Image (cartoon, rainbow, N blue to C red):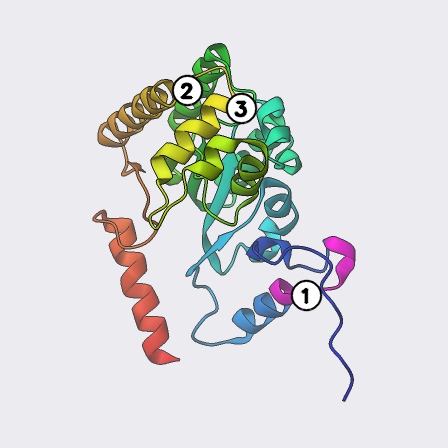
Amino acid sequence: MGSAPMCTRPSDSTLGFSREQWSGEIGFLDELAEACAASPVLRRHRFMLAYGLVFEFLQSAELCKDFIRTWNVGLEAFDPKLLKGDSKGINKGPDRVHEALELAQSLDYKLYISGIMGLPGTTLALLRSEVDNWLAMAETYRDSITTVSVAAPGVIPGSRMYWDSYRSHPGMRSAHGEIIPARRLTEQYIRENTEVELADVEAAIAEVGRGVIALGEERGHMKFGGYMLGGADEDEAAERRLLDDICNRI
């Protein structure tokens, strides 16, 4: 029995699996598009949520437009300096982000958008700029956005942030016990890698949250928080009923 070809790229991003990307080794999305188009139950229904970086969405959006309803994207940050520090330089900064959001809106995708405040290199001026950019984006695309979710860096054991800090800072190693103090690790990470404090980051996140909620109440159902499916608004309820119906018919 022959062995399967090795995948030479990370496998955590659904929208990266098309033949137009990553040397064309994987055609999962192409096969899924063909299967949905051929199915009397699935064709003409957009029922999936899929994660993908900005670059991957730009490559896959047309291919997936008939079966993916919601694009879940980690924009992470708007300033290219912060993106570079977070290894998300593939998002390429605000121009590429704007291009992708415009395409998503033109193809009637729903958007679940997440980001991080307090990345390495953050200053008070950059933090202010990030708040303004998040609120401007939310206002511009509020008819397409279902949820905006912004958080401080999660220094999760096993992550790159965690190991970088563990190797570099004695305070990180001394914080360990039977229960790992997540908030304390985040506070120390921000203090060691930025010019701001966790309190500054949390105040900025709260300002974004208030702005997003106010925009959603003014028009549409945009939320600020951390869930993707099963909200209280009519669109999400209808999509959940559609998904349940499709699953029952399959």
The alpha-carbon separation of the residues under discs 3 and 2 comes to 19 Å
Residue 42: quarter of image: bottom left
Question: Dot 1 corresponds to which residue?
Answer: 27
Q: Is residue 185 magenta?
A: no
Q: Which mark is residue 131?
A: 2
The alpha-carbon separation of the residues under discs 1 and 3 comes to 39 Å
Could you tell me which residue is drawn at 45 percent across and 34 percent down? 153
Amino acid residing under circle 3: Asn
Q: Is residue 29 magenta?
A: yes
Closer-to-camera residue (208/169):
169
Q: Which mark is residue 193?
A: 3
Residue 68 placement (x, y as % from top left):
48, 57
Residue 124 placement (x, y as % from top left):
46, 12
The correct choice, above or below, for 19 with respect to 1 in the image is above
Residue 4 placement (x, y as % from top left):
73, 76
Packing grade of label 1 (10 A; few <14, some 14-19, many >=20) is some
Could you tell me which residue is drawn at 43 percent across and 75 percent down? 41
Packing grade of label 3 (10 A; few <14, some 14-19, many >=20) is some
The nearer-to-camera label among 1 and 3 is 3
Q: Can see residue 152?
A: no
The correct choice, above or below, for 130 with respect to 29 in the image is above
Residue 130 placement (x, y as % from top left):
46, 20
The nearer-to-camera label among 3 and 2 is 3
> Which residue range is magenta in the image?
22-30
Closer-to-camera residue (43/57):
57
Q: Residue furthest toward the bottom?
A: 1
